Amino acid sequence: MTAQDGARDIVLEAQGLVKRFGSFEAVRGVDFAIGRGESFGFLGPNGAGKTSTMRMVSAVSQPTAGTLSIFGLDPRAHGPEIRGRIGVVPQDDSLELELSVRLNIEMYGRYFDLPRRVLRERADELLEFARLSERADSKVDDLSGGMKRRLTIARALVNRPELLILDEPTTGLDPQARHLLWERLYRLKREGVTLIITTHYMDEAEQLCDRLVVMDSGTIVAEGAPRELIERHSSREVVELRFGTDTHDELHDALASHAERVEVLPDRVLLYVDDGDDALRGVHGAGLAPVSALVRRSSLEDVFLRLTGRTLVD
Amino acid sequence: MTAVAPELGWARWRRSWWYHATFYAQTWRGSVVSSVLFPIFYLASMGVGVGHLVARHHGLVAGQSYLHYIAPSLLATTTFQLGEGESLWPVLASVKWIRVYHAAAATPLEPRDILYGKLSWVVTRSFATGVVYTAIIAAFGAVQSWWGLTLPLIGALITLAFAAPLTAYAARVESDASFTMIYRFAFVPMFLFSATFYPISSYPGYLRPIIQLVPLYHGVALVRAAAFGQGALPAQLAHVAVLGAIALAGIAWGRVTMRRRLVD
């Protein structure tokens, strides 16, 4: 961690955090600190240890080793108190499908010992926030996937949490539902709620996170702001070339002189360059004829590929 | 946000009890009608109908008409069915399929709060059912002692003795494959052979010790003794001890399996 942490109001801090299940080590000693009001992301493929980490930072599962401090408290000793100040949006919505939208919020609020009168008011507010006011009396079973997701977020906000933890918030949603959800999360962020988000979508991480860590096989392989990570680990632009053959491997040497770095994937070749158009002219000038060529800016996907040698979404 | 003050355990698990009660309040309608009509139909059919046949060939059963003899055991079998019915599939759904217990574990509730809340709710329902059944059994003339007032409590104990270990078991399995087997090879025989429909003395001597190993037998023996005000008190306390031990062991096991399932 950097020196600036001293000045920040730290909500959550982990040092050498380990989670083991029998002989399997899901999280292998990770360190991170999250400041108040920050929106912090965990980016990585399935099986990277994100969900295990989320369960520890939600004060639900206990770390096998390492130290964890949430709101300055030790979750081993203060689990219920910490969870009273956190909201959790799990990967699967885990809603009561037989009950109404409104009751799902009110009944969950009782777990936090909130009085019924308060819950009625909060349910109104949260239904408004989640744009579900018109569906308040519908059975959850009848909602669309995006609506269920928004209801799960509304439910997680019933105790007015200082910290909201979202595990893969938009997985399985269509683009429109995703954008509506992102927009709602921006609003929470503006209101000062600290967000922790896991995702395997790089565009989501770039959109939502002030800062993120890239996880792979239970470890953190990089940490920083999305732009910062891209600048540090990738070039400014990327040229994607498809040759329509299976001979991409042989092209590696031919292309190497045209780029800072060449990455050969099964279906395409990536050239990491400062100026894409310039590099593409060079490729054509050398007599190579790709079937298709695309020049784009570097993304977190490229960072991930650089750091792990694998693509993020298979 | 204000910090939540350190709380007593009971203050937390009553929130889970309330959750189940609210859920039931939304979905109770069908079950209440059947829980009043079923015992009346059952007693009319088995007690009056079969009882007529028994009276012609056999006379009284253990000093009672057949109707009176089987009426209390209906309370035992019903509270047994309530205990098992609320435990296997509903618990597996809550920890695996719909995962509402996982949602609860992300709140101030601890796994044991979720367990206690669930069990205490099932026991509450059993007690309420026991009150209704006791009244119906009394209306058929089968409650013949003031000990009959303990029938709803006995029913609650029977329910807990099944709900606690079965909840513990359901919280640890990965599929419902074993549930059907438990139904066929444990619940159905238990229902039929726990001296439910005739005295244990009807069995050959060598079978009786085996019947006495069946948990439900102890429940059936208890309700009958309470309804008729018969039987030595130490023997009844032994039945209570057997059911109570099973319930306590089930709760202890459930604390382990719930914790493993929800927070590991």
Image: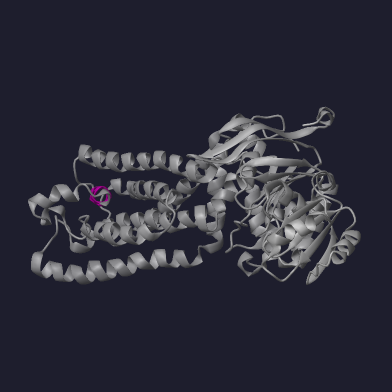
- Residue A297 sits in quarter: bottom right
Number of marks in picture? 0
Query: Residue A112 appears at what percent x and percent y?
Result: 65, 43
> In the visual, does B113 lie left or right of B256?
right
Residue B134 seen in the figure: no
| Relative height, residue A128 to residue B122 (above, below) | below
Which residues, given as a range, are shown in magenta? B217-228
- Determine the residue positioned at 37% across, 55% down: B84
Query: Residue A2 appears at what percent x and percent y?
Result: 80, 31
Secondary structure predominantly adopted by residues drawn in magenta: helix
- Determine the residue positioned at 48% across, 39% down: A23
- Residue A102 sits in quarter: bottom right
> In the visual, does B16 lie left or right of A201?
left
In front of the other: B148 or A281: A281
> In the visual, does B105 lie left or right of A102?
left
In front of the other: B12 or A37: A37
The verdict on residue B220 being magenta is yes
Residue B73 seen in the figure: yes
Query: Residue B211 appears at what percent x and percent y?
Result: 18, 51
- Determine the residue positioned at 15% across, 47% down: B209
In front of the other: B52 or A35: A35
